[in-house]
Image (cartoon, rainbow, N blue to C red):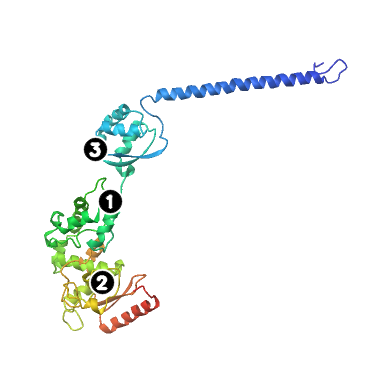
């Protein structure tokens, strides 16, 4: 008979209680042993990891951090910077990893995305991959800005002062302008997105823009293609700047180019050249911006840029056109248009006409839009 029963065959409650208490004691003891072992194992693993990482971290990093490598920094300098920011464990590990990577000799100055506790080889891999890990500050110059309007944008984006930039623009001889620019930067500071150096200077920032213009002009073969259609490169760039100011839809640009050339070449209702009579050039002459129409007083201004009063093109660009406008000026559409008007300034919808009568209908549509949209014309 089981010892859980007494001599009379009844359940022995005292014995059962004793066994339960014994079992609990065993479980508690086991828990203490297991818990102590786990604690010991954890401490042992931590010491093992410390030993493994005496000179170098292992793993994939911990926290995101950015570090800046100054111009002219040596490998040792870089290692010290990375150790200070807790990116790598030691300069020795970084130097060893850099020595094993040939591209480490061309690490660029700048700010890089890193992580704390990175293996040195991983840190080097980031430094030699600027396309992925370099933090690049950029400034965007949009198409159609005159250079005086670019100055505050550049100042804000680069940290330079407007006075520093204007000082260079007052004497643009060092900007690398093409001869046909006649030492005038208007139209030759190419609109694009530009990288900002860690310590920018005004001449370098502005020269990057004229260098980009020269690159685009060469890719478009501006000088030869302008001659092929009977104009100088400065005249074509001037037409491009007018296109940039007058319309914003890609399909309208070659048509405006054709209308301008038709006026200049006398392909008009009278068979004679006609004045361009462009509000955009009058606005430029008056130093304004952001409007669609002009007043009688503005159109009465004596200026070589007032195309209501002078024949032909103004003496130079009225803004900095983008590549699309330059291409349109070099490759005008085929057509007989001599008039155009934006009939919906919000959408940019533009209508063209070959006769004054048809143009007046389009103008009436524009005026109706303005009447329905007070303050937007």
**Residue 282 at x, y = what percent?**
22, 73
For the residue pair 348 and 115, the one nearer the viewer reads as: 115
> Where in the figure is residue 324, as x and y percent of width and height?
26, 63
How dense is the environment of label 1, judged by Cα within 10 Å: few (below 14), some, or many (20 and up)? some
Q: Quadrant of residue 29?
A: top right
Residue 336 in view in this figure: no
Foreground tag (1 vs 2): 1
Return the mark for residue 255.
2
Q: In the image, residue 303 lies at what x, y percent?
A: 17, 73
Residue linked to disc 3: 106
Q: Earlier in the sequence, mark 3 or mark 2?
A: 3
Left or right for 217, reference 119: left
Q: Residue at x 35, y 35 (%)?
A: 85
Q: Classify residue 180 as left or right of residue 331.
A: left
* Figure quadrant of the N terminus: top right
Label 1–label 2 contact, CB within 8 A: no
**Residue that numbered label 1 is attached to:** 159
* Secondary structure beneath label 3: helix
Could you give the CA–CA distance between mark 1 and mark 2, rounded to whole angstroms? 40 Å
Distance CA(mark 3)–CA(mark 1): 27 Å
């Amino acid at each position: 008979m089981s010892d859980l029963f007494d001599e009379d065959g009844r359940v022995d409650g005292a014995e059962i209680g004793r066994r339960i208490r014994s079992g609990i004691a065993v479980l508690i003891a086991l828990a203490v042993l297991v818990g102590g072992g786990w604690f010991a194992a954890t401490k042992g693993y931590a010491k093992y990891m410390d030993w493994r990482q005496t000179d170098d971290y292992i793993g994939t990093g911990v926290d995101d951090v950015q570090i800046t490598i100054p111009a002219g920094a040596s490998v040792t300098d870089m290692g010290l910077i990375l150790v200070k920011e807790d990116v790598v464990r030691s300069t020795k590990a970084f130097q060893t990893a850099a020595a094993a990577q040939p591209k480490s000799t061309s690490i660029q100055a700048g700010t890089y995305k890193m992580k704390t506790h990175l293996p040195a080889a991983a840190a080097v891999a980031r430094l030699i991959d600027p396309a992925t890990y370099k933090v690049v500050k950029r400034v965007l110059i949009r198409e159609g800005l005159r250079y005086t309007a670019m100055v505050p944008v550049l100042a804000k984006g680069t940290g330079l002062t407007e006075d520093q930039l204007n000082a260079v623009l007052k004497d643009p001889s060092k900007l690398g302008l093409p001869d046909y620019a006649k030492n005038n930067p208007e139209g030759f500071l190419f609109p694009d997105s530009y990288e900002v150096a860690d310590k920018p200077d005004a001449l370098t920032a502005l020269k990057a823009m004229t260098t980009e213009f020269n690159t685009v002009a060469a890719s478009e073969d501006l000088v030869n293609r302008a001659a092929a259609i009977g104009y100088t490169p400065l005249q074509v760039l001037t037409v491009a700047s007018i296109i940039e100011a007058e319309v914003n839809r890609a399909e309208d640009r070659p048509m405006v180019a054709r209308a301008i050339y038709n006026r200049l070449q006398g392909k008009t209702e009278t068979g004679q050249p006609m004045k361009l009579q462009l509000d955009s050039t009058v606005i430029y002459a008056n130093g304004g911006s952001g409007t669609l129409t002009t007043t009688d007083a503005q159109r009465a201004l004596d200026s070589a840029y007032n195309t209501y009063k002078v024949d032909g093109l103004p003496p130079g660009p009225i803004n900095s056109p983008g590549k699309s406008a330059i291409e349109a000026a070099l490759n005008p559409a085929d057509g007989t248009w001599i008039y155009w008007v934006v009939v919906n300034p919000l959408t940019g919808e533009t209508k063209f006409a070959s006769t004054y009568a048809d143009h007046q209908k389009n103008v009436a549509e524009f005026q109706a839009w303005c009447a329905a949209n007070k303050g937007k014309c």
